[in-house]
Image (cartoon, rainbow, N blue to C red):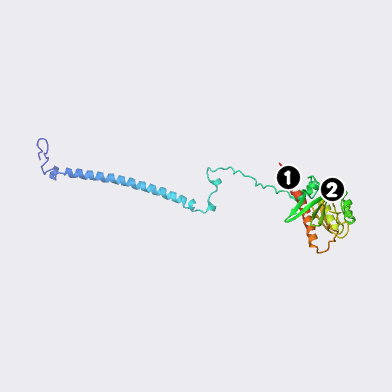
Amino acid sequence: MSFGQGGPQWGPGTTGGPGGGPTPDWAAMAEASEARTRRRKWLLIGGGALATVGIAAAVAITVVSANSDEPSASNKPASELPTAADIPGASKEAEPSFEATTPPPPPDPKDFISSAKKDKAPLTPEGLFPGSSWRTGERLYKKGPTDSTTKCASVAQAALGSILAKNDCTRLIRASYLRGGIAVTVGVAVFDTSADAAKVKDQVTKGLVDSLSGKGVPAFCRTGVCRGTYNAYGRYAYFTTTGYTSGKDVTTGDTKAYGVGDDLARFAFQRINQRGEAQASAAAEAPQ
């Protein structure tokens, strides 16, 4: 076989090729090659995307797995939530605390009139029975004479005087009041303690404080029958002697005379109690 000069000849438009086979379709081959290249590229991109999704899914699964053992804080009951001290970064310092304080109770007025050690206010007839009269409701009582003595038994009938002396009476203050022909002498006996005054109240069964006349109050209870009362409050025992200025006897059930005597006995109690209240109030206002 002779090849001739330059070897076999083929070229565009010829149908022959080496060995006499068909000539390759280069355009088709190029397109096929390009298509294969494109497919490889998409496979690479797709694979990368799938790998990314797979990693994200794995992370998500890991996070869920890590939190799946316990319910979330938002679903926990308040009793299971961490305290402020358990939260990272929370202050460990205790909150400032203050002791609860309660104001002291006000002083008891009776405490000041139950013992000579606390009952220090001046004690005079005018201080105990002030003014020229006393009114209760519509009833007006005119005040007459007053006096004060440390010899308590000297201004009382014997039965009462002996009890006053036995229990160490230190002073007896008297004041008389008049209303509608009925006169009353109020006597307030002073002791060192409330126990002494209580003994007098319990021991006395008869005997009166002597009536005190003058300054518009006629003599009364010098003769005849008069009514007496006995009581005690704090370190004070107080008495009343009630009678008619006409000398008329006071009889059982005499509501008029009894009413006047009860009014003045209540007045004596009020004045003793007010003495305690005044001292208690002064003590409460004094600087501590």
Q: Identify residue for label 2.
A: 148
x, y percentage for residue 154? 89, 51
The quarter holding residue 205 reads bottom right
Q: Residue at x 39, y 47 (%)?
A: 56
Is 137 left or right of 86, judged from the image as shown?
Answer: right
Q: Which of 148 and 65 is in front in this view?
A: 148
Counting other residues with Cα less than 10 Å from the Cα at mark 2, is it few (<14), some (14-19), or many (20 or more)? some
Q: Earlier in the sequence, mark 1 or mark 2?
A: 2
Examine the rendering and report whether any part of residue 192 can be seen.
no
x, y percentage for residue 167? 87, 52
Q: Identify residue for label 1.
A: 282
As helix, strand or loop, the secondary structure at mark 2 comes to: strand
Q: Which of 89 and 189 is in front in this view?
A: 189
Q: Which quadrant is the N terminus positioned in?
A: top left
x, y percentage for residue 194? 81, 52
Q: Which quadrant is the C terminus positioned in?
A: top right
Counting other residues with Cα less than 10 Å from the Cα at mark 1, is it few (<14), some (14-19), or many (20 or more)? few
Q: Which residue is drawn at 73% across and 45% down?
A: 282
Q: What residue type is labelled 1?
A: Ala
Q: Residue at x 47, y 50 (%)?
A: 67
Q: Which amino acid does label 2 sit on?
A: Ser
- In the displayed image of the protein, which residue is found farthest to the top? 5
Q: Which of 110 and 76 is in front in this view?
A: 110
* Alpha carbon separation for disc pair 1 and 2: 26 Å
Question: In the rendered image of this protein, does residue 39 appear above or below residue 136?
Answer: above
